[in-house]
Amino acid sequence: MLVLGWGPKAGVIIDEYSEYVLEGSQVDVVLQDPSAENLSEIRAIDAAHDRLTVLHHDKNPLSSEDLHSMDPFSYNTIIVLSQKPKEGMDPEVADAETIVVLLHLRSGRPAETQHEIHLITEVLNSDNQDLISEVGVNDFIISNRMVSMIFAQISEEPDIQSVYDDLFQEEGSELYVKPAKLYFDSFPVTCRFGDLMHHARRRGGEICIGVKLKEFEHRSAENFGVQLIPLKTETFTLGPDDALVVLSEDDT
């Protein structure tokens, strides 16, 4: 995993990541002129984990030359965090720097890679989500909005916390976006959402809660192609690049 930048959440991300990876995995942290506190934190995280190594690289992700010297597309996962990790930073400035890093990545991205690359970033100001989606990000997190929504749900229905506790740990089921070709042999295929639920249940007891349509993945107005909890009678036409959103015990 390549981490571009740093911040209070970085340690938590790496801790969670370590529960899922093979022994011998590596996290490379790119942060220019880190403070003594940041360096100490990175070293402490490295020392705390036996299954992975955490290394710091003193380079500037806002510099295209420095960024591409890391050969970013050789990694499985790229996470973009704040380039100036400190409390009270203007969200607009942080998001602007994030967009610069993403543009550098897009300009140097090869047409094809030998493996799937997950590009993830945090958006501090939800008004910037359209800009973020235009620069090729697979996944982004609007952290303040997400946390507020979770708190609101738990305040209305406290029992739902047990569901989040199950989802946010290594054991138990997790949310996955799985390609439609795992469920169907030929395309296009047209069926109701209730039928998709049936196909998922037959495949190891998975629970289908939605679909992701490839043609809309860059359109914010279409929720980036994701539809959750549609009516069972709603009809979808899926191609090989579309996917089902499921609760499952693994990603296979």
Image: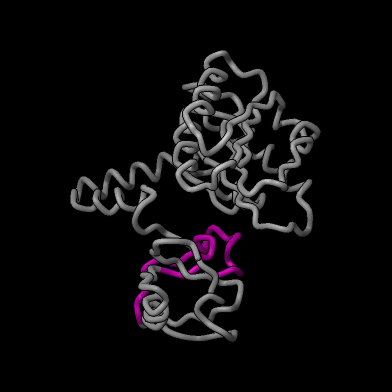
Can residue 94 be seen in the rendering of this structure?
no
The correct choice, above or below, for 176 with respect to 65 in the image is below
Residue 215 included in the magenta stretch of the image: yes
Q: Residue furthest right?
A: 65
Q: Is residue 30 left or right of residue 18?
A: right
The correct choice, above or below, for 38 with respect to 128 in the image is above
The correct choice, above or below, for 148 with respect to 49 in the image is below
- The magenta stretch is 210-232
Please state which of residues 70 and 220 is positioned toward the viewer in this rendering.
70
Q: Residue at x 68, y 38 (%)?
A: 101
Query: Coloring scheme of the render?
Result: one colour
The correct choice, above or below, for 57 with respect to 182 in the image is above
Q: Residue at x 44, y 61 (%)?
A: 250
Q: Residue furthest top?
A: 36
Please state which of residues 223 and 2 is positioned toward the viewer in this rendering.
2
Q: Is residue 2 left or right of residue 191?
A: right
Q: Position of residue 65 (x, y in %)?
A: 81, 33
Q: Position of residue 196 (x, y in %)?
A: 42, 79
Q: Position of residue 151 (x, y in %)?
A: 28, 43
Q: Total number of numbered labels?
A: 0
Image quadrant in which the N terminus is located: top right
Q: Residue at x 55, y 51 (%)?
A: 139
Q: Position of residue 25 (x, y in %)?
A: 59, 42
Can residue 106 be seen in the rendering of this structure?
yes
Q: Residue at x 39, y 49 (%)?
A: 170
Residue 225 included in the magenta stretch of the image: yes
Q: Is residue 169 left or right of residue 74?
A: left
